[in-house]
Image (cartoon, grey):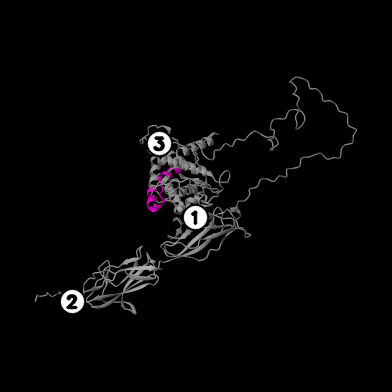
Amino acid sequence: MAAHFGRRLRKGAATTAVAAAAVAALSASQAPGVTIGGQDGRTSSGTATEPEESTGDPGATGNSPYYTDLPPLNSPNPSPSASSEPVVQGAAEAGIPATVLDAYKKAEAALRSSKPGCHLPWQLLAAIGKVESGQARGGRVDADGTTTSPIIGPQLDGNGFALIKDTDDGRYDGNSAYDNAVGPMQFIPSTWAWAGRDGNDDGLDDPNNIYDAALAAGHYLCRFGWDLSDRADLRRAILSYNNSTEYLNTVLSWLEYYRKGTHEIPDGTGTLPGNRSDTRSTSPGPSTPGTGPSAPDTRPSKPGKQGGGSTEPPASPGTPSTPPATTPPSTTPPSTTPPTTTPPSTTPPPTTRPTPTDTVDHLENAGTGRLTATAGEAFTERIRARAETDAGKAVAKVRIRFTVLGDTDTAFTGGESVATVLTDGSGVAVAPALRAGEKTGDVTVRATVVGRVVPGLEYRATVTERVADTVVRTDDEALACTPGGEFAHRVEVLATRDGEAAGKVAATATLITAADDAAVNDEGPYFKDADDKAVRTLSGLRTDADGRLKLPRLYADDTTGTFLLRITTAGGATLTVELTVAEADTASSEPTTGA
């Protein structure tokens, strides 16, 4: 979505035709398909479709207006060097303000580390930034990347735009009645509430900061496990940002343009697009008689009949007036019919029809049962909520926000803690699949109605620890040692569950007194702690991703005999290992003499 820039951006009547011709020309020059793939350069074609995962989601921008200018058809190569010297229009279009360009590249680097499977190109952020705000109004940002003044889009009041009532009490957009898209990447407050990121490490997540906004946009485009090197996923991601085929085509055009080359220009010197999607011509056509009420005639009445006015010109000054003709009194009896009067209009004043959201009275659990999953695994059941009126009637087309609460690493597919879903014809919204993190215990997920204050609905999910049902040694080496010595071999085990490696399973190793007595032995073999002190119980152990666990080295005191080491995993799997401490066989070490 593009911002208000303190002046009205005019759009000629021929803009749509010109844009269509440019798209057609660009498409023809790139036939059979635009190369937008990542490392593998995959391409594909097809019509735009809204991603299933984000059905009903208002997107990052709430489908706000955006700039429709298309890039020049000529390639930007060779790119001019960064300078303050004037450049031709094509080169200027390819130039990106220095701070803005740095923010895009830092966001790409961050996502390459946190979500490597997404393959986010910084050129995609640049394309969206161009379409949404003209690269932060041509790079008008300070040294920290914050815009010199807030970039605020039109209020989303349903008048030509989506209807999104206030969700942030005006915190970001200054509007406590409706939401507006905010900042260089034009996030609506309800999306920023969960997608916002701190991209410049100042401890704040500010939608008007290009570093924060670019990183947030990157995470937004990389949710649901999308791989942006895949054509279909790329299209889904862009459409989820703003659900418009024209928007998709415009962003793809700029993406391809920036892939061919770009360069850095000084902050504040970028060009500002001239056309927006919301500046269609709205001038009325020719008046059609009888199609509506006429404006009242406010001209002064001429002398003559009351209400109609005389068609005769007034007398010239100094000319005596002609006395009115005398009409003899009528002999007809007066009429008893009352004078005709115009009845007052019975047309009721226009009323605002309530939206589906306005009719929601409460949320109901739509059949979600007990939610339990092992750490690191997906919950088999998805959370379902139904929106209902006060009479219990289902309400369709209502946005339900699902939020994972508390200090937990459990999240929805794609790693996000918030998901917004539109209710279907039966009033039910189904949240994305929930995946358990490594932190065990109870997790709360809250469902709320976006744009209406009604009591939320909470669901309890339980994350259980990873378990193993079997644990065995990985070798059969003898475990022996002389008194006061060190065991030559370290104990290594493999934990499995249902025949598969049980990775990241908690385990404990204890030197026990006897097979039928699990008390800790106070003599014999021992481990060493960080201070080289003897310890005979190790807790907090965990198998690796392949289910393997190698214990620290074992040592022996002066006590000889056979001792037992017991390894126990979460889930109850146990293994008992024998350890032998004995004097060395001196006979085998005596020299042998010949015959």
Q: Is the magenta stretch mostly helix, strand or loop?
A: helix
Q: Looking at the rendering, in which quadrant would you find the C terminus?
A: bottom left
Q: In the rendered view, would you say 504 is above or below 233?
A: below
Instruction: Point out residue 473 in the picture as x, y percentages from the top left corner.
Output: 32, 70
Q: In the rendered view, would you say 348 is above or below 464?
A: above
Which image quarter: residue 593? Answer: bottom left
The residue pinned by badge 2 equals 585
Give the distance between the C-alpha atoms of the residues marked 3 and 1, in whole angstroms: 39 Å
In the displayed orientation, state which residue is furthest to the front. Answer: 595
Q: In the rendered view, would you say 460 is above or below 68?
A: below
Q: Is mark 1 on a helix, strand or loop?
A: strand
Residue 76, which numbered label? Answer: 3
User: Which amino acid is tagged 3?
Assistant: Pro
User: Which amino acid is tagged 1?
Assistant: Ala
Give the distance between the C-alpha atoms of the residues marked 2 and 3, in whole angstroms: 83 Å
User: Which amino acid is tagged 2?
Assistant: Asp
Q: Is mark 2 on a helix, strand or loop?
A: loop
Q: In the rendered view, would you say 334 is above or below 457?
A: above
Describe residue 300's horizontal placement relative to residue 93 as left or right: right
Q: How crowded is mark 2: few (under 14 residues within 10 Å), some or many (20 or more)?
A: few
In the rendered structure, which disc, 2 or 1, sits on the residue that comes first in sequence? 1
In the rendered structure, which disc, 2 or 3, sits on the residue that comes first in sequence? 3
Describe residue 543's horizontal placement relative to residue 162 as left or right: left
Residue stretch rendered in magenta on the structure: 107-128
Instruction: Point out residue 469 in the picture as x, y percentages from the top left corner.
Output: 39, 70
The front one of 32 and 119 is 32
The structure residue drawn at horizontal position 85% and vertical position 40%, both measured from the top left corner, is: 337
